[in-house]
Image (cartoon, helix red, strand yellow):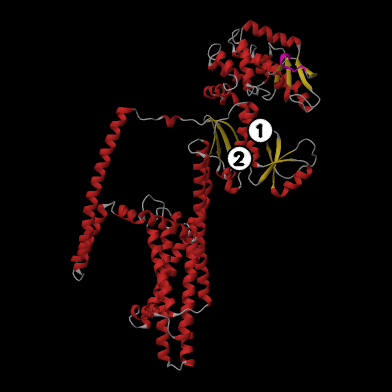
Amino acid sequence: MASQMDQAVQGSSFSLGRNQDIALGVCVMLILAVLIIPVPTWILDFLLSINISISVVVLLATIYLKNPVEFAIFPSMLLILTLFRLSLNVAATRLILANGDAGSVINAFGSFVTSGSYVVGFIMFSILIVIQFVVITRGAGRISEVAARFTLDAMPGKQMGVDADLNAGLINEDQARARRRSIEQEADFYGAMDGATKFVRGDAIAGIIITLVNIVGGLIIGMLLQGLAFTDALQLYTRLTIGDGLVSQVPALIISVAAGMIVTRTTSEENLGADFGAQLMRYPRALGVAAALLAAFGLVPGMPTMPFLGVAGLLAALAYNSSQTAQRTSQAKAAMEARETAEADLEAPQKTEDLLAVDPLKIELGYGLIGLADPGQGGDLLTRIQIIRQQTATKMGFIVPVIRIVDNMRLRANEYRVMLREAEIARYELVPDHFLAMNPGLVEEEIEGISTREPAFNLQAMWVSRANRDRAERLGYTIVEPSAVLATHLTELIMDHADELLTREDTQHLLETVKTTAKTVVAELIPNILTLGELQKVLHNLLRERISIRNLEVILEVLADFGPRSKDTEVLAEYVRHALARQVCADLKDEKNVLHVVTLAPKLEQEILDAAQQADTRDFVPLSPARAEAIAKAAVLAVQRLVEMGHDPVVLTSAQSRRFVRRIVERHMAKVTVLSYNEVDAALRLETEGQIEA
């Protein structure tokens, strides 16, 4: 029997929950019907009782809120309740003017509340209007405006905090999505409250107008149509009108108070009543001083003694109780802290590792660039960074660590900087609402803009406004958005510092991944032939010259073959480059399978080899600084011809001298590629465009 009753209750609740939308629609349509269709007095009494009850329930519900967003339907409810009250005003006005009777509720408010005097009732009605219109509604409206503005202004920072936590791995995608939804709901709620408070203000004005219309209309109808004397008509219709005004404005005042409590409510772990009790009783000395002052007032000659002394005694009792509670809480807190400290001393020392954490990569934005990282403002920087990490993994064969994005108020408004393990590696200043226009070499007409240098490749460029963007595109300029400029700059920085980003942990992770397809070579190489650190150095040497390590299985095969012969990681890296010849040359050849290069003069190459053999050097250039500077300048002049012809800067040397030549020229031309003859794909045709002589 009990189970059958439970099933019946669950079924009825399910049916009610399923039909809530229908019930709300019916209620709104009935409210609109009351505006048009006359209703009997007993129905009006019932509806007025519902109006008062709903306002009381809403007020009590706001007291138990812990977060204003928990009552997100309040703006819509405020509109519906305002419309409900106005419809009741219209229905009451129709009954008052047509029948001279508006039901028991209005008669009770008009007679009992006003003490039988319409003058008293009019004064009370006026006071309620002033309280609601001047004090509560105006204050709640102002707070709503400020809260909406500050909530919207704080949205980008909050969303950046969520994205930063997500990039740092502190939260997952579901948690980030929930926090973003909470931020959006908060902004929508305060934005809606900013407009909803205007309903209450308009309701108060409508109440005044309806009251005046009822009094004037009642006098006209009573005197002209019903033949009543002026005083009788004034007393009858004024009493009913004031009763109608009071029975409408009391719920309106309650709803106004509820609206004010919601917009002034801050997020808390407890409801409003608990917060009042905890925060007002937090300072027993204040209560004690207030009790003493009231007791002093009670002893002043001429002052009523008992009221002041009674309230003073109550405050003194509250002060004593609050003091005892605070003392017990303090003792319990001290005991708990002592116990936790003792347990921590026994189990483990206090951890400070969090203070030592360093972000591998971090982008700091000035406050003017926050919108680039805020999807709510159309910013796509986060999406671009995700694409960069995916492209780097595909192109270079390693996972770029999580890139953290933070704001930095010490930077200029439109400036950003990139940090590598807390050390600055680049900074640049963007111009928001502008586009970077670069001349590809075919545009002769100049365009108006702000002259600058493109940060990734140091090319001459111009910042053009939105108005000039279309014209710049028609002229042939390459147009780039600010977020794309930052993303391109970041991509080049990642490529330039790829070797610094690959840690031993990353190397171990790559090995674990390749084990699924090449378990044998991994087991043979590590740690029997090379250590994990030696493998990492080989990969560093490759990444330093932008050689992809994605084909890790081939790299491990080569190291397993040549590792027993030499432990020199630079020599091993050269062997790997020879095996990756097709991959190395893939991006350097032209569409005709021709590789355009400049070579090293035989005498100069022999000079470098002799110096290397005499110094037996591995980690530094075997030449004097002056001689190395002269060779580097000669290389720049020779390579310049390749660049002017539209080819990549490639220097071709022997395998023995390649790495030394690279070290000599890289300080003057970081983007230069130095190849050995062993690294040239046999399927390519070589064309020499010059020779380096010094």
**Going from the N terminus, do you reach mark 1 or mark 2 first?**
2
Residue type at numbered disc 2: Thr
Amino acid carrying mark 1 in the image: Ala
From the viewer's perspective, tell me whether residue 293 is left or right of residue 386.
left
Which secondary structure, mark 2? helix
- Magenta residues span 677-682
Instruction: Indicate the quadrant where residue 657 lies.
Output: top right
Q: Position of residue 181 (x, y in %)?
A: 51, 48
Q: Secondary structure at mark 1?
A: loop
Residue 238: name its quadrant: bottom left
Task: Check disc 1 and report the residue beneath it.
Answer: 456
Q: Nearer the viewer, mark 1 or mark 2?
A: 2
Side of 256 where 406 appears, left or right = right
Q: Is residue 419 above or below residue 198?
A: above
**In the foreground, 214 or 555:** 555
Please determine whether, in this image, residue 3 is positioned above or below residue 308: above
Residue under the point 41% across and 66% down: 54
**Mark 2 highlights which residue?**
383
Residue 316 in sight here: yes
Tell me residue 197's x, y (percent): 48, 64
Whole-percent x, y for residue 650 in the image: 73, 21
Foreground of the two, 64 or 409:
64
At horizontal 42% and vertical 29% (from top left) the residue drawn is 353
Q: Residues within 10 Å of mark 1 (few under 14, many from 20)?
A: some
Q: Residue 393's spot in the image, x, y percent? A: 61, 29
The quarter of the picture where the N terminus appears is: bottom left
